[in-house]
Amino acid sequence: MTPESIPIPAAEATLFELSRPGRRGVEPPEPGNGIPELAECLGENELRRETPALPELAEASAVRHYTRLSSLNMSIDTNFYPLGSCTMKYNPRINEVVAGNPGFSQAHPLYDAREIQGYLELFSRLEEMLAEIGGLPHISLQPAAGAHGELTALMMIKARCRERDELERDVVLIPDSAHGTNPSSCTIAGFKTRNIDSGEDGTIDIESLREALGPDVAAMMITNPNTLGIFESGIEEISSLLHEAGALLYMDGANMNAILGITRPGDFGVDVMHYNLHKTMSTPHGGGGPGAGPIAVTDELEPYLPVPRIVHSEGGFELCADRPLSIGKVRTFFGNSGILVRAYAYLRAHGPEELRGVSEHAVLNANYIRRRLEKAYHLPYETPCMHEVVFTARNQKATGIRALDIAKRLIDMGYHPPTIYFPLVVHEALMIEPTETETQETLDRFCDAMLQIAREAGENPELLKAAPVNQPVKRLDEVNAVKTPILTCPCDEPVGD
Amino acid sequence: MAYYPHTARDRENMLEVLGLASIEELFSSIPEEIRLGRELELPERASEPEIIRELGTMADRNARMDNRPSFLGAGTYQRFIPAAIDALSSRGEFNTAYTPYQAEVSQGTLQAIMEYQTMLCQLTGMEISNASMYDAGTALAEAVFMAYAVRRKGNTVLVSDAVHPEYRRVLDTYLADHPVEARTIGLDDDLTAMDSIARTLEEDGDDVLAVVLQNPNFFGLIEPMENAGKLLGCGQEGAEKQPDRPLLISIVDPISLGVLKDPGAYGADIAIGDGQQLGNSPNLGGPTFGFFTTLQKHVRKVPGRIVGETVDSDGKRGYVLTFQTREQHIRRERATSNICTNQGLCSLRGAMYLAFLGSHGIRKVAEASTRLAHYAHGVLTGLEGVEAVSSATFFQEFALKLPVDADTVYRALAKRNIGGGLPLARFFPGRNQEMLFAFTELVTKKDIDHLGDELGRVLSEELREAKA
């Protein structure tokens, strides 16, 4: 079957188009007789004039609507999804099963510590495991996502500067290959950013770092392996330089999937890092979240961690909020608890050997793709890669093909595109992260598709420029979306279901 | 049990293609000195049934809302969740997809977000909504940041003392390194002291960039939001002009909007809240989602993702993430917010909840909750020594003053298999004898009568003991 012959799924009407006045969906429970009427409870001036105009659908129609919508998505469960920097590995079903246990899902966040001993035990054990994996002894599970973990850590670094009377340290160094969340988190935490260039091998340029270091630097944010998939082999020198200058080293843990059980941030000089449990620890991305971004810190930073802290005493687990140096709370309650349960289940499915195996096979898969595609696609850096490989569309430029066109043609072939145009330091970047959970057969089919696209780029570039052709929509006009913004569904044209 | 599929033969084949003798060689760029050189100290791997047993044992050691009558709320509520939501939201096509950056292969998620945004606007009476925030606490912090960017004047945000204390704590953390300072507005009969806001505005109006109120407030009481809107002069500028006055940030209970006046009606500039009640279990407070709605004219200052409608190259309708130049992956240090991953699947459940209940259903849930709460108010204030803390109108929750320590009562009720209300001293030191009770459509008249009987017994026992 050619991409052009795959049947195109039909577009789905909106809930509002499917709605019919007076139609009833799921009926909530009735309160029964013998209780006050609404008019006896609330006054006229408290009531809204009209009931909110929500759609009115029968239950079966709504089920069909959402089922059809789901079929318009690519997902890990349906397609190979080699989205670089996102670690789209298989999300084990067992994690969903255990998180759905009502002992977890039906616990109220304002229960007393005595009433949530099971949760606190799980949190405490998860903290221990994450501490061991990162080589950093203290963990806060509160941050809700990676960017939230970054922000939490930067707030702690700010608090430390304040405590040490060093508020003149208001600059954070950021490599030019960093995720956009890094500089953005700095601004919110009240820091300025200073750029550090990458060297010719794709790693941090030590000279550029030396020049940027000064008494105004509070910290540096690195990603290791970096967003080019390259291990910062000068990491020990980098951390020494920072520490000598009185600054701290932060690590964005987005790429932890490359180094589990192989090397530990705490052992190469990192003072604070975040984990992305929705990347490394297999919790589902959910079409954009929820994730969890726990942070791990050294003894020195421990007093600044968010409250409450979990403490284990003879009587069981307790919550301690009496911590004068703590930055406070960064999220209500305990964070994304249900995601923490899933991550715990994932880690329990791996012993030390299997967890190291995760990284070994993730790196093996990425290098296999690199080898199979390196003749057809330009590699901007010769340096060996870890769990992901960055190519560019340079070889295809002659016929006017861009990374975007290659990405869209991959959709025709049944693959989710890699990350494109990131990292920003690479022109026309194609960033491929296969993860460890893919078979050699899948990788081979994907590479065959990539090689076919490279041929098509020379022979029939229009195929790429017109792609995708077998999705419910073709390329969408993003400029128009901003010029004439439509940010809610127009509700006036009903159609049949 | 590991989830990677490689056989020994696969490994050999692949290494051969790479021209390597061992997996070890793949890691040659990591300096020897920093290699771990030992196995991690982690527990040995467990099989699926072992994991289910281990986590099941932990789960059994947590109290639950669903196996006894429960009257604890304070921002997190146990509600009826249509069965279809679990079935649909757990579909891998939704649950295992990434953020919909590649629009053509993400139309399902994008359209669902577009519909979510629309329903949130219908509910709140606001004009635009983003795709979600982490929770109400961080949504509040982002709302204050946005108000600062819109107003460009003033460094003070007035925050009612009847705002959920957890939200306030998050806001305070976020403001620690920000030029804005939060000043608390006190209470009168547990309602926000509007005269105190009026006085501050008169004395120091130019320095106030926003006022934050919660409705119903933390104590379940209905705030005079229309008065607040009038006091600030909300809604006078028209659709285009930016306001030269403090912004009104309203934290709302989404269920209450089935019957209560919406933020759009009283001229709120930003309306936010927690979406847990919309189809999400309590989950110990997470994951849920925060919602964030505002006016169209502020669209370029909004934090987080927004979906918009557009057309494809054939002119066919489709959906994309839009106004992305506000966001961190493009604007970096000048982004409106650092949020990237949000709470997508939880807000999808929120959208499904609203779609399955519809106009009729959401109104019924709100009505049932407030009617049951008013019935309970009669029953419980009829008990000897129990009195209402405030005389103001409440929605589905109210505080009672008990003749004995509330924490003691909470424990005694738990022994009788009843989940009591929140002892208010947990957040408000000194209010030791007060308990905040919540009622949703999931409790029955019988549950309330039972609570009345048991609370009566507990109180007389405690009073007897206190005398002895």
Image: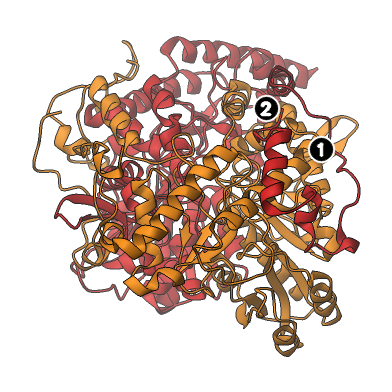
Return the x and y of residue B188 as percentages of the image width and height: 47, 50
Q: Is residue A424 above or below residue A262?
A: below
Which dot marks residue B404?
2
Q: Quadrant of residue A211?
A: bottom right
Return the x and y of residue B424 as percentages of the image width and height: 61, 38
Return the x and y of residue A326 as percentages of the image width and height: 74, 59
Residue sitting farthest toward the bottom: A211
What's under tag 1, amino acid-wise?
Glu
Please say whether residue A434 is visible from this viewpoint.
Answer: yes
Which dot marks residue A384?
none
Q: Nearer the viewer, mark 1 or mark 2?
A: 1
What's under tag 2, amino acid-wise?
Val
> Helix or strand or loop: what does disc 1 sit on?
helix
User: From the viewer's perspective, is A262 left or right of B112?
Assistant: right
Q: Is residue A174 above or below residue B220?
A: below
Q: Is residue A15 above or below residue A60?
A: below
- The residue identified by callout 1 is A353
Chain A shown in which color? orange
On the same chain: label 1 and label 2? no
Marks 1 & 2, CB-CB < 8 Å contact: no
| Front position in the image: A79 or A12 | A79
User: From the viewer's perspective, is A265 left or right of B140?
Assistant: right
